[in-house]
Amino acid sequence: MPKVIIAPSVLASDLGNLNCECKRMMDDGADWLHMDIMDGHFVPNIVMGAPILSSVKKAVPDIFMDCHMMVTEPGRWVKDIAEAGGASYTFHLEATDEPMDVVRLIRATGMKASVAINPGTPASEISDELGNEVDMILVMTVWPGAGGQKFMKECMPKVAELRARFPHVNIEVDGGVAPKTIHYCAEAGANVIVAGTAVFAAESPRDVIAFLRNQCTA
Ligand code: DX5
Ligand code: ZN
């Protein structure tokens, strides 16, 4: 299985102190920071966009920004996010009929390319061609749009199916992942772990990050 990566979702952070929050998470052992970008169309919320990412990247140059694009026009933001310092760009399969075109667009900027599926989208919608081309597949474990929701265990068979079909691709889980639910993700074969509330609301984010990592490497 590919390397275990822990990516706290900044949606649950003190957004007014975002630079410090990202720095703090890296000091506490985070590998990546998960940045949720919403356009108010694909999901009903708006949080942040490229200018905010750019400011974070300037303040924390070593950061790996894992950009989760919950947007209806995935191709539209590729250039802006790349210029802002995004390292990985995840678009939703539900948002496009031409996923391979979006992947090519992302690749041309030098960013890692990744595709996400919502809880209602079967894993079979990821074609062999697409799965073998991307760096990562994100299996949502909540309906996207907000932090702090309940983990959907029923998404785990999709993680297992994709891990079996694409043994060398990163498989990411996002939504409701916490010390109580991490074992489901680890058993199914996820290796990139996003956790917002569980990390930021913890008394010791460092301990939670270490715990999540240990559960996946055990
Ligand atoms: C949901 C976002 C998630 C969210 C995770 O739309 O994509 O990244 O912030 O937060 P928790 O871990 O609190 O469910
Ligand atoms: Zn996310």
Image (tube, rainbow, N blue to C red):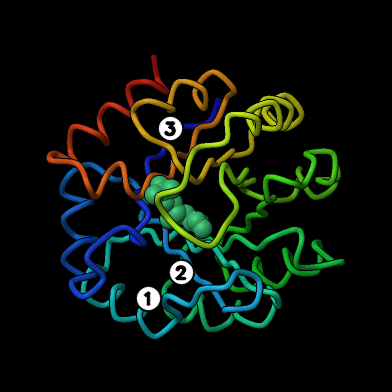
Which residue is denoted by mark 3 in the rendering? 4
Q: Position of residue 153 (x, y in %)?
A: 58, 29
**Dot 3 crowding, Cα within 10 Å, few <14, some 14–19, many 20+:** many
Which of the 4 quarters of the picture holds residue 214?
top left
In what element is the residue under mark 3?
loop
Question: How far, Cα to Cα, is label 3 from label 1?
Answer: 24 Å
Which of the 4 quarters of the picture holds residue 189?
top right
Q: Which amino acid does label 1 sit on?
A: Leu
- Disc with the residue nearer the chain's start (3 vs 1): 3
Can you name the residue that lies furthest to the left here?
Answer: 203
Left or right: residue 28 compared with residue 56? left
Question: How far, Cα to Cα, is label 2 from label 3?
Answer: 20 Å
Which residue is denoted by mark 1 in the rendering? 53
Q: What residue type is labelled 3?
A: Val
Q: Which image quarter is the C terminus in?
A: top left
Foreground pick, 51 / 179: 179
Q: What residue type is labelled 2?
A: Gly
Which residue is denoted by mark 2 in the rendering? 86
Q: Which image quarter is the N terminus in?
A: top right
**Dot 1 crowding, Cα within 10 Å, few <14, some 14–19, many 20+:** many
Q: Marks 1 and 2: in contact by CB < 8 Å?
A: yes
- Disc with the residue nearer the chain's start (2 vs 1): 1
In what element is the residue under mark 1?
helix
